[in-house]
Image: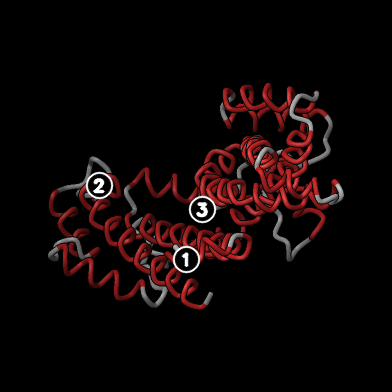
Amino acid sequence: MIKFTLRRLLSGAVLLVVVTSASFFLAHLAIGDPTAALLGDSATPVQRAALRHQLGLDRPLLVQFWDWFSHALHGDFGTSWRNFQPVSDQISIRVPVTLSVVIAATVLAALIGLAVGIATGLRPRGVLARVLKVASVVLFALPGFWVSLILVLTFAIKLRWFPAVGYVPLAHSGTEWLRSITLPSIALALGAIVMIAEQLRNGFLEVTHQDFIRTLRARGLSSRRVTLHVLRNASPAALTVLAVMFVGLLGGAIVVEIVFNLPGIGSLTQSASQIGDIPVLLGLTVVTVVFVVVVNFLLDLVLGWVNPKVREK
């Protein structure tokens, strides 16, 4: 298990270096000269040249990369080109907002998806299984922003159960914090619930018809113990989907944060993209990749515990 853990840590570190390095060069290649967006069309060539020198854009690209990379290793992502504030400070303020919504959505999707997946797996021709099929079609057809707006109109404006917009930090009020992230979390979790439930249901159906399950039943094991064996063998695929969905929810948070006016990394990504604020975009890329690496590492550990054969890969 130690060798397995070390291999996963090494592969995660390599992924982090490769992705962030590639992102640096791709960002500079795609954005090019950001001085026009930063200064406006009325800026003179002298003003643009002065700003390029101030931002260090007149240096060779490899020199710029090494300067950024060496500082990023210590958690320093430079300063924003828009407001000249430290990128690390801006991200650290917004990360808790996005993580609050994404983690809540992931937990909600895992709990409901697990319950629905097990129920439909045990009764594949039941009413709930039919509802799941219809829900999978409907939810994937509806745009995320439309679902968010419906939730706001119904539960915030009409029923007044939750606030329509805004975010309350957990340190200020636990109750208000929970109320402020409930609707955004539900909006993010709906599609993930269906995917996890369907994956677990399909895994249940596949494992249930295998020979070792018939052997367990023939030995007289109770239905509960047989179900636990089926769940353990069907869960790896659902866990993988859950990890992938967590990463996907980070990207989907952009739309939700805009609709609910949440000051998270999604809204920061949007504003930085509009003006080509490369230091902010690179800092957000590093943070996102770190989340991906951590989630995949935890997934590998869980899968290695559930299925020891995974450790041999």
Q: Report crowding for label 3: few under 14, some 14 to 19, many 20 or more residues within 10 A (C-alpha).
A: many
Quarter occupied by residue 53: bottom left
Mark 1 crowd level (few <14, some 14–19, many ≥20, 10 Å Cα): few
Tell me the distance, in whole angstroms, between the alpha carbons under discs 1 and 3.
37 Å
Q: Position of residue 266 (x, y in %)?
A: 51, 48
- Taking the spot 24% from the left edge, 45% from the top edge, the residue there is 30
Residue 248 location (% of width, % of height): 52, 45
Q: Where is 210 relative to 151, above or below?
A: below
In terms of sequence position, does the residue under pointer 2 or pointer 3 come before the other? Answer: 2
Instruction: Tell me whether circle 1 and circle 3 mark residues in contact (CB < 8 Å).
Output: no
Looking at the rendered structure, the number of numbered marks drawn on it comes to: 3
Q: Secondary structure at mark 3?
A: helix
The CA span between labels 2 and 1 is 43 Å
Q: Which mark is residue 111?
A: none
Kind of residue sitting beneath label 3: Ile
271 is higher (above) or lower (below) than 156: below
- SS at circle 2: helix
**Which numbered tag is attached to residue 265?**
3
Which amino acid does the dot numbered 1 rest on?
A: Glu
Which is nearer the eye, 72 or 87? 72
Is disc 2 surrounded by few (<14), some (14 to 19) or many (20+) residues within 10 Å? few
Q: Which residue is found at the position 23% from the left and 56% from the top? A: 25
Q: Nearer the viewer, residue 158 or 145?
A: 145
- Drawn side of residue 271 relative to residue 306, left or right: left
What is the quadrant of the C terminus in the image?
bottom left
Asked which secondary structure carries label 1, the reply is helix
Q: Nearer the viewer, residue 245 or 83?
A: 245
Disc marking residue 312 = 1
Residue 1, can we see it? yes
Q: Quadrant of residue 304?
A: bottom right
Q: Give the amino acid type for the residue marked by disc 2 in the picture.
A: Ile
Q: Which residue is mark 2?
A: 31
